[in-house]
Amino acid sequence: MTDDQWFREAVVYQIYPRSFQDTDGDGIGDVPGIIDRLDYLHTLGIDVLWLSPIYRSPQDDNGYDISDYEDVDPTFGSLADVDRLIEQAHAPGIRIVMDLVVNHTSDEHPWFVESRSSRDNPKRDWYWWRPARHGHEAGTPGAEPTNWQASFSGPAWELDETTGEYYLHLFSRKQPDLNWENPQVREAVYAMMRWWLDRGVDGFRMDVINMISKHVGPDGSLQDGRPIAGTVLGDGTPFYICGPRIHEFLQEMHREVFDGRSQKYLTVGEMPMVTVEEALLFTDPARHEVDMVFQFEHVDLDHGEHKWDRKPLDLRDLKASFGRWQEDLADIGWNSLYWNNHDQPRAVSRFGSDAPEHRVASAKLLGSVLHLHRGTPYVYQGEELGMTNVPFAGPQDFQDIESVNYYRTAIEAGADPEWVLHNLRLGSRDNARSPMQWDASANAGFTTGTPWARVNPNYPEINAEAAVADDASVFHHYRRLIELRRSEPAVAHGHFTMLAPEHRTLYAFMRTFEGTELLVLANFSADELAVTGDDVPRLDRWSGADLLLGNLADDPSSVVEPLRPWEARILRRTT
């Protein structure tokens, strides 16, 4: 492996600073809190810290609405705190990756304040401004320039009374989209990125970066999307997902920001709706775009007609998705591996079992399966503890703008409130944003004040202090998985072969590398499961294999005996 491919052996840990550790008693996590917990992260063994946004922000979307890219929001601390974090993280070899949010800014960013001040302002074209639809009066129903629906519900256009035109916002109305067609916008973004690299950060996770190129007609027009059933709005994604200039923009970014620097930085593109064919282009090292993509295919599998229409996961669908990405990126490109992040509910409640008798085993199983795939694993804060979804009592408990908007619009449309609440409890991003559970003291040791979000009431049983003290905990299983990635080359570099693709509860696959074979067996059920030769060809070869890592307290007497409920085994043999 060359030095510029170091990330293939790395494990990334995502911190949602608002919910990680508070040090000043205001109930909100901060950068000094991250510094205070570096020893914990070093013990876990991670290589990279990815920080969700800590920039100055009105916090309409919890920091993903940025009003100043080159300052830290006082809620989280100061630039001096960030400098101290970088220095102290680098000492034991932990890299720092910042969240780059440049599809949109806050409407309070000085760029947008100027842009909206008049139609002839020099920064007017830094954002997407359009007059009302032909034949319509601005502000009347249907007058929006296109029928696109915003990701957080409602139209993707907001009328600005000052100039009488609409601006585009693919997310909240307080998150206007930057116009990447304007070279001045791109250079301003690149200058900001260079500023952070000069400050010592080690790369960027790029938020919805495949939305920055829009399909624009010769006359500057944007097109209507296919109508969405049950609403007057349309699906605009074909006109802004992986648009016509996206590869050009990313290659330009690489040239302008990263070329000529001696260090190899990490670049991760979060790309909703990206296909594996597109990911091959984005992550081909010869094209100089991004190192890996964050794709959403596997976390959309339990969705019905839309995100809030939840259905049970079919394990066969999960294997088909993971297997396709493993196979198609086998020779060129790279993938991110994750169950959790700040936008997803807790994996143990979603894909495993958070029942007390199965939570630890299923959390370890999920870690075993994910970390043994080919790609760079991501651990989201609390995942290494087996943290669960929060038992939200009612609509008043939800704070995330996406969840709040969904509840309001669904109720206005006549949906049953209990059905809406059920879906919110399963899928809300608030599940991932509950405070980190450090110990059994008040507020789980997160804050001495009033926490900004509800602490999960199971923190006396599920917390870091107890997990670190228990050698059989989820924490230590994740620590061993991270160690295994370093000690066993087949984990990071081996060929992947999916087994038993049609089995409803068995997840099985092999990794092979230079005479070493690894077999991963995982029982995604609460029932005992026998593994047969139909599932694993030449199963008898594994009777004398080494059990490299198991997830239950007592090892099986034979590595090929039936799998117990939520049991995972990683076996190793040499050929």
Image (tube, grey):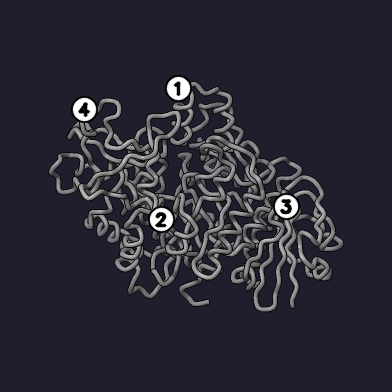
How much space separates mark 3 and mark 4, taking CA atoms? 58 Å
> Mark 2–mark 4 contact, CB under 8 Å?
no
Which comes before the other along the chain, label 3 or label 1?
1
Which comes before the other along the chain, label 1 or label 4?
4
Q: Which residue is mark 3?
A: 503
Q: Residues within 10 Å of mark 4 (few under 14, many from 20)?
A: some
Q: Which residue is mark 1?
A: 412
Residue type, mark 2 in image: Met
| Figure disc tally | 4
How much space separates mark 3 and mark 1, taking CA atoms? 42 Å
Q: Which residue is mark 4?
A: 137
Residue type, mark 1 in image: Glu
Q: Residues within 10 Å of mark 1 (few under 14, many from 20)?
A: few
Q: Which residue is mark 2?
A: 206
- Whether residue 252 sits left or right of residue 517 in the image: it is left
Residue at 39% over, 45% down: 237
Residue at 68% over, 58% down: 477
